[in-house]
Amino acid sequence: MNKENKLIPELPSGFEDRWGKKLLLKKKLLKAIENNFIKFGAEAIETPTFEIRKNIGSFLAEDDSNPMSDVFSFRDGDKSLTARYDLSSPLARFYAQNNQELPSTFKRYQIQNVFRNEKAGNGRYREFLQADFDIIGNVNPAQANAELCNLISSTLLECGLNKNQFTINVSNRKIIQGLIDELKISEKKQIKVIRAIDKLDKPGFGLKGVEDLLKKERKDQSGAITKGADLSDEQAAQILNFLKIKDLKELKENLKNSLSQEGISELENVFEVLRYGSNLNQVKTNFTIVRGLAYYSDFIVETNLNFKVTNNKGKEIQLGSICSGGAYAKLISRFRGVDVPGTGISFGVDRLLFALMQLDQIKIEDQKPVLVCVMDEKYLKNYYELVDQLRGNNISAEVFLNTKKNLSKQLDLANKRQLSVAIICGENEFNDNTITIKNLKGVKGENNQTIPKANLIDEIKKLI
């Protein structure tokens, strides 16, 4: 191949290879998350990567003129398919399709990749792993939503975080919806208002950025312009004043409309149930969270880390939510014509991984193999007998795969792979029924020991 025609080994923006410590930590997190989901009573489902576009809708879209701009779609014959952008919309389709076979209260968990055609960076990917837990059915909302908070806290503790390292923020969409209705904001503008508020804590926004999005437009540092909700000065001022309120009691005194009062009461009920458990102190009210997705109807939750991380440019940043969700009343009724309430949360596993890799407080067990070196090709059968014995005792092991390499080359490879133990057996060992073990992490000159073959497993377990 000509030099000019050589391929460049690179990934598209927003996608990532993972291996080594990072992948080991990800697998550990997944195990902890899945075990906790099961402990809280959920059963697993899987759905396909692609769904029929009209079935899962376009709840992410911020560009009204191009509602599918944030997702990956393509034509398949007479249908348009979309790569799933979350796991809630596929769940709604799944439940509507299979509801006759499911229990009246259905707890499900789902751990799969999702895809979003959006700007990448700072722990944000275009393909990333979500771990979802949902409760569908006519249940006591306060109990179900409190259970989600308990699950979030329990799961993050199982993942290795301490209680002071995360906060579970909760609110209720009815609170802001009541204010929006009171201000007579048109239905067409409402989703823009919700999404403007949702950006309050995002880098570069704050109250001024939200105000710009509530009014005519916002220009970011690059000069790009985002069209606003075009509210009046009075409407925008009322919403900004609402965002400054931190206390549930103060909110109750300031918002007198019935829908806001209903949302406040529902939130109080969640805290009442939380008092029965051990996670109350992890949960705080935050009325600035509204969740940008259009299908949330009342209870909403966002979980944030209480420490900063460093982005790819070496700058300290707040990572954003690592687990979020809420209640949805009409997501399933799009299919069935009957309202089936649901509530759920989603862990951004890859974003959590991004943070925990930097925190470096979680011990990772890496089962590196014992390397059986090949001293002489005529003993190959004996080497494989040793490997079988090790593997039969649940010890990772392998025979060096090139009989032409000398011992020095074999040990060089073992060290490069950061292996702990090598077995070195030649004619003397096989004649004497012994094994020579080399501790690759030991002190040079003192790291070889020759033992009776019968003691192999016990001695290896001391070193790995």
Image: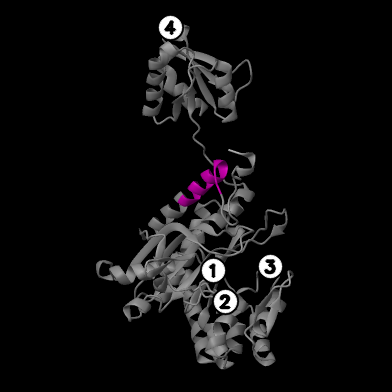
Secondary structure at badge 4 equals helix
Q: Position of residue 253 (x, y in %)?
A: 60, 88
1 or 4: tag closer to the N-terminus:
1
- For the residue marked with disc 1, what is the amino acid? Asp
Q: Is residue 23 magenta?
A: yes
Q: Nearer the viewer, residue 418 or 1?
A: 1
Residue position marked by numbered label 3 in the rendering: 203
Residue position marked by numbered label 2 in the rendering: 63
123, above or below 432, in the image: below
Residue at the far left: name it. Answer: 100
Residue position marked by numbered label 1 in the rendering: 70
Q: Residue at x 59, y 26 (%)?
A: 415
391, above or below 452, in the image: below
In this rendering, position of residue 451 left or right of residue 320: left
Q: CA distance from mark 4 to mark 3?
A: 69 Å
In this rendering, position of residue 79 left or right of residue 161: left
- For the residue marked with disc 3, what is the amino acid? Pro
Q: CA distance from mark 1 to mark 4?
A: 69 Å
Secondary structure at badge 1 equals loop
2 or 1: tag closer to the N-terminus:
2
**Of helix, strand and loop, which mostly describes the magenta segment?**
helix
